[in-house]
Amino acid sequence: MPDQSGEPFGSIEDFISYLASVETTLETEVERFANSIDAVTDRISASLRSAIGESPWFPDTKPLPPPPSQVVATPVGYLEASSDWISRHRAVTAAVVCFLGTGAFLIWRQRRGNRVKRRAKRAKNGQRTEIVVLAGPPTAPLTRSLSLDLERRGFIVYIPVNSLWEERLIQGESKADIHPLHIDVTSPSSLSSTIRKFTALLDPSNPPKYPLHLASFILLPQTPSPPLPQNIANISADSWSDALTTNLLSPFTLIQAFLPLITSQSSSILFVTPTNTPSLSPPSRALENVIAGGMDKYISTIRKEMSSSSADNNVVQFKLGAFDDASDRDAFKMAVALRHDNPSGGGSSPALPAGTEQRRVRGTPLRELHLDVFDAIVGKRRGMIYVGRGSRTYDILGKVMPEGLVGWMLGLQTRRKEEAREGENEEGKGSRTGSPGWERVNQISGEESA
């Protein structure tokens, strides 16, 4: 093989040397060509940058986008706006509709029930046949109010009494169908005799010649007003005995005497008990708390006995709250009448309602109690009935609230009352004598005489 000079290679080593020199030459030429291309490219890039930078038509920054087109809102009517709000707040709308609907239904049902005339059954000749025994203090405004309302609705009302001046008090109402029923619960023989005479009155063979029916036996609170706050250490044994005998033992004895007649006549038994104070079990109210607890257990027991037996008797407990104290003036008038009729103070002289000399308290009208009592007598209402402002609330709070919190709240209220009482005593020291309650009685009696 020849070399560059045209002469053949003398050996293989010469040929390999020749190939090595060719490779070196080729690399050098390629490198020179690449450098030439880089230099040309750099010159072209610099020229373009210079031309673009010096060109006046090329913008410096990106142009702003065009402004959005303004949408003119058309006026929306109240109906469309309301529909749009309801569609966006469905949960709130459903809650409001449920609340307003339930309230409207309850108000409508109450007003509809109030418009219904409630009258007792009568005989074909128009004579009254339904009898109600209203066992309550004849001097209490609640007894008088219920007796007048039941008489107006067509019932024959009997009120147990244990003295002549209470009998004269009932007869002084001048109502032909409100009668006193003289009962002495301390004498078993006298009590049995009275019950036999009363049972004979219901016998259709005796005059009048139409059947009479004992519709209900109603037990009212025996104490017209709650006792004054008193610690257990200061309550004497005589006070305990008098309170338990008057409020528990005597009513229980009376119910036991009437119980055979109540069972045979399928009569309803109505217990009317106060709720607000006993529900909280406040301190210094031991007499009220014990009486209320004993009465509640007695009512629960007699209700279970009636339900377990074959007798169809409706046992109802009314838990009373606060009522409109418009009847306080009637209580004072009754106290004035009893003071004149019984000047010696003998017998069970009435106690004035506690807090009468204080400001008026807005509560539930007594008409609500009258309507509920009638419905319970005829069997439309059963079980436990809350009547009066705060009755249900106080009962729930007494069961749910801790005793410490209740005691703390009652302690604050007691201290405020004591401070107010001390301030009144300091202002009126030396200017008032006697009992403020009886001063109010004298004032009313003077207004009536004038």
Image (cartoon, rainbow, N blue to C red):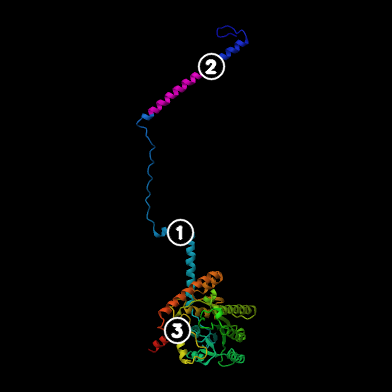
Q: Are marks 3 and 1 in contact (CB under 8 Å)?
A: no
Q: Nearer the viewer, mark 2 or mark 1?
A: 2
Amino acid tagged 3: Gly
Q: Which residue is mark 3?
A: 437
Q: What's the distance in space between the residues labelled 3 and 1, CA to CA?
A: 60 Å
Q: Amino acid at mark 1?
A: Ile
> Which one is in front, 418 or 199?
418
Q: Secondary structure at mark 2?
A: helix
Could you give the CA–CA distance between mark 2 and mark 1, rounded to whole angstroms?
Answer: 87 Å
In the image, farthest residue toward the left: 56
User: Of the residues shown, which amino acid type is indicated by label 2?
Assistant: Leu
User: Residue 381: image x %, image y %?
Assistant: 55, 77
Labelled disc at residue 86 = 1
Residue for point 45% across, 22% down: 39
Q: Image quadrant for the C terminus?
A: bottom left
Q: Quadrant of residue 129?
A: bottom right
The reply to whether the magenta stretch includes residue 152 is no
Residue 26 is marked as: 2
Which residues are the magenta region? 23-51
In magenta stretch: residue 25: yes
Between discs 2 and 1, the one toward the N terminus = 2
Q: CA distance from mark 3 to mark 2?
A: 136 Å
| x, y percent for residue 415 | 48, 74
